[in-house]
Structures are given as structure tokens and as C-alpha cells.
Image (cartoon, rainbow, N blue to C red):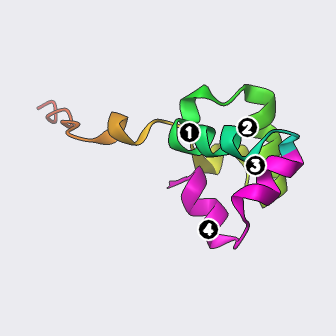
């Protein structure tokens, strides 16, 4: 699953364009992209629609939340 930033770049869409679509300042959008867990739900839906990706296909978790995650051992 790709992050918001990865999807935006894959679609060749600027941060400014997404900020305009959300009616927020580009600095606000930049903060959201670095901290996606802070994006209000309605804005996250707007962003997903604008970049043309289903909401469930975007990883809105903070990047550091997936670092050093241990997978559970199989139950035997």
C-alpha cells in the first residue's frame, strides 16, 4: 500500500494542486503529507478523490509506525 505522498507523485500531481482542491494552504497540506494521521477524514476523502485513488488504497499511517514491526509467530 502506497503512502499519500507516493500516490501523489505517481499521479504527477503537485502539492499545490492538492492543497487547492482541499481549500487549504500548501503548508498545511505539506504537514498533512508528513503526518497523514492528522488529516481530517473529510479532507482525506477529498484528497483520495482528487488524486484518483480509492481511499482504502492509501496508507494514512505515519511512516514511523511501520518501522521495526515484529510479525507474530505462526501458531502451531
Looking at the rendered structure, the number of numbered marks drawn on it comes to: 4
> Disc 4 marks which residue?
9
Pointer 1 residue: 60
Q: Residue 22, labelled with which disc?
A: none
Give the camera-side residue of 58 and 31: 31
Question: Which region is colored magenta?
Answer: 1-21
Please tell me which residue lies in front, 60 or 32: 32
Q: Given contact means CB atoms under 8 Å apart, are the residues at marks 4 and 3 in contact? A: no
Residue 41, placed above or below residue 53: above
> To which quarter of the image does residue 11 belong?
bottom right
Residue ID for mark 2: 44
Q: Which residue is mark 3?
A: 48
In the rendered image, the vertical position of residue 1 relative to residue 39, given as above or below: below
Q: CA distance from mark 3 to mark 2?
A: 6 Å
Q: Residue at x 16, y 36 (%)?
A: 74
Picture quadrant where residue 5 is located: bottom right
The answer to which of marks 2 and 4 sits earlier in the sequence is 4
Is label 4 or label 3 in front?
4
Is 15 inside the magenta-drawn segment?
yes
Callout 3 touching callout 2 (CB < 8 Å): yes
State whether residue 58 is above or below residue 45. below
Amino acid at each position: 500500500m502506497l503512502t499519500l505522498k507516493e500516490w501523489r507523485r505517481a499521479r504527477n500531481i503537485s502539492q499545490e494542486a492538492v492543497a487547492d482542491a482541499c481549500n487549504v494552504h500548501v503548508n498545511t497540506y505539506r504537514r498533512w503529507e508528513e503526518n497523514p494521521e492528522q488529516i481530517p477524514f473529510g479532507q482525506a476523502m477529498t484528497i483520495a478523490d482528487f488524486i484518483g485513488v480509492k481511499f482504502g488504497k492509501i496508507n494514512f499511517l505515519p511512516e514511523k509506525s511501520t518501522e521495526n514491526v515484529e510479525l507474530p509467530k505462526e501458531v502451531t
